[in-house]
């Protein structure tokens, strides 16, 4: 009986999750009347805006990841090493982006950093890009911080630091050559998750008026029939790729540890 | 050690260590806390900058009230259904006697699906349940069932519910599977030895233990759906009357005719998700006290 119910629940779930995936794939192949073809994909790949916006979002994702690592790794390390009493506050702050909706945060940015403010970031496109990167770093903060903090938990931060210090290492050396390599898997997991979040993000990019991949997809969706499902298939493949890479690095590290 | 104290009085030592989190504090202040404060303060300011409650009073129109009500309803229903369906799938895999091989693919897939939100997700559902979608056409040609005639429209409230579940259920699965793993076999055996039925074990042992994580996930799913813009916008465009879409339109083009009303609208969103999380924290501390 339990087994029967379990299978029913599981298979219904699988059906619910598979149908949209099958639906979008099938629809994306239907552009040519009467037969399946990759015409919709060709159209998408021929569109220069696809490459421009995709490249833009990829660049921003890269900037977000680098900034996120530079911000989170030293902070999480320092809190573990010297400031355990600050932990609850820091954890609370890193969880805030899950509570405050992204649209509210970006609304705050627009009003706080407009052209008549002290820091007029929205005045230039470079400034807006910086602002968008910071916005993405905020969105990714809960995931990045958790990943890195979990990674730090598995190593003995204090001993490693003392050992490095007694060999004459400075803070930057300790962080770059001792701590970072030890939590690399966690950092990479956070990085790929950030990539998955940033690459198709719509709200912040649209409201800051930047030519990112998310707004481009939305625009195409409002005007075309067959390209949008093709984009959905591509986006799904990217998300799947990011998650696959996370699993890959995790498995790889286990393998490495086992050998040692 | 008196020596160390003399060389370095504790008064001076403390701030030096706090300096280490200065970059993080600056980032959080500039890009998280100050922008939010700006919204909160703006909600209580007139366009001239004086203190006023008028913006909040102005929220009390039919259109805005119904937007909040629809948003809260949408978030409650998708969080509830997401929790229920996610729990069913997770417990099927953990306790239901399903092959162990299914577990890892389910977790991987959940990781992917919970991140497959926004614009592409809307496209996937339009291609499936939209007017010309796969399932819609299939039901019509094979069974003569016309979804539209039956009152189902993807670009409506229930269409949004069905779509949101695609990221709500996996999120629940991801969070609840570790919690289910934490239920020890001994507890179940102990309950059985004392003569408990399966239902009693769940009601009196497992559920109270899981309660905090269930609640936490519920609050998270609620906020997740309450703040979602992209999926709804790509699905229905700017028409659907839910708060994030209204705020989106307001930021883009000041549709409310009063910029400070936008602050009030956004402030209302913070209050709702904030309340959801405060409820969660209160209930959680209560249930944890009970557990001890």
Image (cartoon, rainbow, N blue to C red):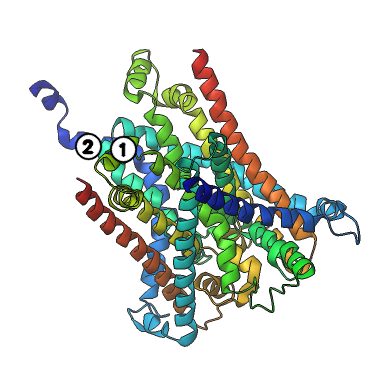
The residue under label 1 is B189
> Quick check: B1 left or right of B223?
left
Q: Is residue B68 above or below residue A152?
A: below
x then y, percent, for residue B273: 39, 64
Q: Position of residue A216 (x, y in %)?
A: 71, 59
* Residue A145, picture quadrant: top left
At mark 1, the secondary structure is helix
* Distance of label 2 from label 1 (alpha carbons): 52 Å
State the residue in front, B167 or B265: B167
- Apparent side of residue B185 relative to residue B100 in the rendered image (left or right): left
Find disc 2 in the rendering and name its residue.
Answer: B14
Q: Residue at coordinates 27% horizontally, 58% vertically from top-left?
A: B283
Between A131 and A260, the residue placed more toward the observer is A260
Mark 2 chain = B
How many badges with numbers are in the image? 2
Q: Nearer the viewer, mark 2 or mark 1?
A: 1
Does label 1 lie on the same chain as label 2?
A: yes
């Amino acid at each position: 009986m339990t087994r029967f119910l379990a299978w029913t629940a599981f298979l219904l779930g699988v059906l619910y999750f598979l149908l949209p995936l099958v639906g979008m794939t099938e629809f994306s192949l239907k552009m040519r009347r009467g037969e399946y073809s990759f015409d919709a994909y060709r159209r998408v790949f021929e569109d220069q805006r696809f490459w421009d916006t995709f490249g833009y979002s990829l660049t921003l994702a890269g900037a977000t990841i680098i900034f996120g690592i530079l911000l989170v790794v030293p902070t999480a390390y320092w809190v573990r090493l010297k400031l355990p009493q600050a932990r609850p506050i820091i954890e609370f702050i890193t969880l805030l982006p899950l509570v405050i909706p992204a649209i509210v945060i970006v609304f705050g940015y627009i009003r706080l950093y407009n052209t008549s403010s002290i820091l007029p970031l929205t005045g230039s496109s470079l400034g807006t890009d910086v602002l968008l990167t910071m916005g993405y770093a905020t969105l990714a903060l809960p995931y990045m911080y958790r990943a890195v903090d979990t990674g730090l938990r598995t190593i003995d931060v204090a001993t490693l630091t003392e050992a490095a210090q007694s060999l004459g290492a400075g803070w930057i050396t300790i962080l770059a050559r001792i701590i970072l390599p030890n939590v690399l898997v966690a950092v990479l997991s956070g990085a790929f998750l950030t990539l998955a979040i940033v690459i198709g993000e719509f709200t912040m990019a649209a409201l800051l008026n930047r030519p990112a991949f998310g707004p481009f997809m939305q625009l195409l969706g409002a005007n075309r029939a067959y390209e949008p499902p093709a984009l959905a298939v591509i986006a799904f493949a990217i998300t799947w790729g990011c998650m696959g890479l996370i699993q890959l690095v995790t498995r790889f590290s286990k393998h490495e540890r086992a050998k040692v | 050690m008196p020596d160390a104290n003399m060389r370095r009085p504790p008064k001076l030592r403390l701030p030096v260590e706090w300096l280490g989190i200065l970059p993080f504090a600056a980032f959080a202040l500039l890009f998280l806390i100050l922008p939010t404060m700006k919204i909160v303060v703006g909600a209580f300011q007139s366009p001239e900058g004086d203190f006023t409650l008028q913006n909040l009073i102005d929220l009390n129109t039919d259109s805005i009230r119904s937007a909040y009500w629809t948003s809260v309803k949408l978030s409650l229903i998708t969080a509830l259904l997401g929790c229920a369906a996610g729990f069913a799938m997770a417990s099927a895999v953990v306790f239901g006697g399903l092959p162990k091989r299914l577990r890892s693919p389910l977790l991987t897939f959940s990781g992917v699906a919970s991140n497959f939100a926004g614009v592409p997700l809307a496209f996937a559902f339009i291609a499936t349940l939209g007017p010309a979608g796969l399932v819609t056409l299939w039901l019509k040609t094979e069974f003569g069932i016309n979804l539209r005639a039956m009152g189902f429209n993807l670009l409506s409230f229930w269409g949004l519910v069905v779509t949101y579940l695609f990221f709500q259920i996996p999120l629940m699965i991801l969070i609840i599977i570790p919690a289910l793993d934490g239920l020890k076999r001994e507890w179940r055996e102990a309950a059985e030895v004392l003569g408990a039925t399966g239902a009693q074990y769940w009601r009196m042992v497992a559920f109270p233990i899981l309660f905090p994580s269930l609640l936490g996930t519920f609050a998270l799913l609620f906020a997740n759906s309450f703040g979602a813009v992209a999926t709804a916008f790509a699905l229905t465009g700017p028409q659907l009357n839910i708060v994030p879409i209204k705020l989106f339109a307001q930021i883009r083009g000041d549709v409310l005719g009063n910029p400070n009303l936008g602050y009030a609208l956004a402030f209302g969103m913070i209050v709702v998700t904030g309340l959801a999380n405060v409820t969660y924290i209160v209930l959680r501390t209560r249930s944890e006290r009970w557990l001890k």
